[in-house]
Amino acid sequence: MKPVHPTRFFMTDWAYADARCVARMETMMAGFGRDPSEVRIITEDEIEPLVRENDWVDLDIRQGRLPFTGDPDVVFNAFRWPSDEEKEALKERVPIVRDTRGYTNIFMRMLYGHMPPWHYEDGAAKRSRQVCCWSLYDLHSAYGCFHKCQYCRRGRVTTLMLNIEEFLNAVDGLMAENRWQQVFRYDVETDCLILEPEYGMCRALVEHYAGIDDRYVILFSKSDNVDFLLDLEHRGHTIMLWTLSTPTVSRRIEIDTATTEERIEAARKCQAAGYPVRFKMKPIIPVRDWRGEATEMLEKMFAAVEPDNLSMEMLFFSSVAELEELFDMALFDPAFIDMMRAHEASGAMTDLSHPMPDDFREQVYRHYITQIRRLSPHTPVSLCAETQEMWRRLGPLLECDETSFVCNCGPIAIPGLRAGQVRTLEDGKAELVSE
């Protein structure tokens, strides 16, 4: 695993009752350079006091606003597969499950073993809000991350589900019930590569999907920890997807992640080992000289790999005040900050998923698209979770539209997909069609 140094370790007693979970805990503790005797076994009744004692209460604060330093606490855990009645009973008797919201609530339910190993994105609901995305299930086995990206909320504590065999059985059931989804992404709630191979989940997924002819898994990461993957038998059914940011962002904002160059080198290794590789330029943060840095990043990327496809999404934030709290303002061109202040003051900053003005976002995307087309004219590129208006503006340049594009994490985003092979259905799902 990557060199990380948590100081506090816990394990739920229901996970401790499973010998396979204990064996994985012991392997991971060796990876941390610590002794398993340092792990405190906790009961369900001890969780809420532990949450308050260790200040895990409000996890929705972005990390750029926190004084927290070091690596997150670790809770070794296991899925418990509760019934609906058991979920309601937990909510009634546990205030931190009943009264919290957002990511904090999701994390608390995961701590108690009550979250399923996936969540559903409703594409129809998003499109009703003018956001262009598809319905899909995302897979999860952990919440919380060892990276310290200043715009993210996943720091301070992580919980890892260790009953991998049961996880895979549940995923098989999910796939059987949802034949329309061919590609499943793992894991947007943590960085899936940091704690491997000691955790064992990524190897399990690679080998599992290698045995399924019509399904694919995406490993989603900012890490360069890929050497353990290179000799695995994947049969092209594991897709490697990195979020890729410019050099300043990777070093100054995405703390403790792999740099731009390290992510590209990791992708080169994986492509040489036969894995399809993709990049999501997300979040695009317009630091000083963002044009020059974007061009340099794309040139380095295409010199090293041939990505299967690319996508783009810009940073979102709730106010200029939050932007100033999260980041060192010296990283930005003063003209950008002035533009954002004027935009907010005008009352036009109402879409907090797309807080930057349409004209500015279009300008940034046009630069990226133009450079991509210069360097690799036939590589599919798309917008991620963007508005219908932005698609109207950029669709001709992208040579696709919001109903038929190649998404690098979409439900039918099989390797080699082209825009003409995709169609959006009324329920927000996507389907493959013949060109």
Image (cartoon, helix red, strand yellow):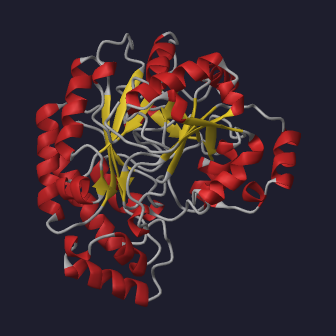
Residue that appears at 46% across and 48% down: 72
Percent position (x, y) of residue 263?
Answer: 24, 39
**Hey, which residue is sitting farthest front in the picture?**
37
Residue that appears at 55% across and 62% down: 60
Q: Is residue 8 left or right of residue 171?
A: left
How many numbered circles does the render carry?
0
Percent position (x, y) of residue 3?
Answer: 31, 37
For the C terminus, the image quarter is: top left
Work out whether 293 lies above or below 61. Answer: above
Res 262 → quadrant: top left
Question: Does the image show residue 140?
Answer: no
Question: Does the image show residue 30?
Answer: yes
Res 75 → quadrant: top right
Q: Camera-side residue: 418 or 173?
A: 173
Residue that appears at 21% across and 46% down: 259
For the N terminus, the image quarter is: top left
Q: Is residue 19 left or right of residue 8?
A: right
Percent position (x, y) of residue 206?
Answer: 44, 18
Work out whether 240 lies above or below 150. Answer: above
Percent position (x, y) of residue 15?
Answer: 66, 28
Res 267 → quadrant: top left
Work out whether 2 lies above or below 288. Answer: above
Q: Camera-side residue: 223 or 289?
A: 223
Q: Camera-side residue: 241 or 213?
A: 241
